[in-house]
Amino acid sequence: MCEYCGCQSLASIDELTREHDEVVRLISHLRPAHEAGDVARTAEIAREIATVLAPHTQVEEHGLFPAMAADFPEQIAALEAEHRSVESVLAEAADGTTPSDPAWPHRLMEVMAMLRNHILKEQDGVFPAALANLGTEEWEAVEKVRAEAGSALPPPAA
């Protein structure tokens, strides 16, 4: 993903980017499962994606986005609406269930395509804008939310 603006030098953005990378990796596993008609495997991957996104979304919506909302209200509202769309479709496979609705795999693939575009908007727009606009106090608030939310990923290799 993006490395041109230096925003990944901030631990907060680096972790969000690592989570994006993992989600994109997981999405790449969906197509073969979907094409094979393996709804159980598709649902399993959806749960893995949801696990990564749970703390990620908390950090964005309770740390990063509030700090950006005054300057970019429409963009932040649109990103939050996209979060709700993704969560809604992923929730259908929660708790180890395999959705019985035959349209669910297609809806999942559509929302995952939207999620890939969403990730690009954050990495190419939100993260560089945050680097340019947020102050120390706002970054500390983001870090506080991260400390509370944790991460589904192992720590980066040293």
Image (tube, rainbow, N blue to C red):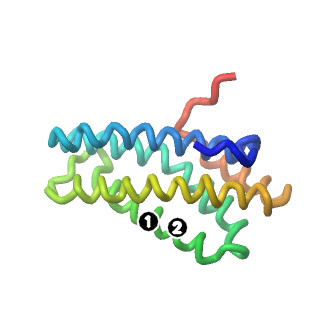
- As rendered, which of 156 and 35 lies closer to the eye? 35
Q: Sort mark 2 into few (<14), some (14-19) or many (20+) by Cα contacts within 10 Å.
A: some
At label 2, the amino acid type is Glu
In the rendered image, the vertical position of residue 26 relative to residue 116, given as above or below = above
Residue to which mark 1 is pinned: 84
Report the residue at 52% width, 40% height from top.
21
Residue 155 - label: none
Q: Does residue 15 lie above or below 73 as drawn?
A: above
Quadrant assignment, res 77: bottom right
Q: Residues within 10 Å of mark 1 (few under 14, many from 20)?
A: few
In percent of width and height, residue 64 lies at 68, 59
Left or right, residue 118 beside residue 6 = left
Q: Position of residue 94 (x, y in %)?
A: 32, 50
What's the residue type where badge 1 is placed?
Arg
Circle 1 SS class: helix
Distance, label 2 to label 1, CA atoms, is 6 Å
Task: Examine the rendered structure and indicate whether residue 58 appears above or below residue 51.
Answer: below
The residue lying at 59 percent from left, 57 percent from top is 122
Q: Quadrant of the N terminus?
A: top right
Q: Which residue is mark 2?
A: 80
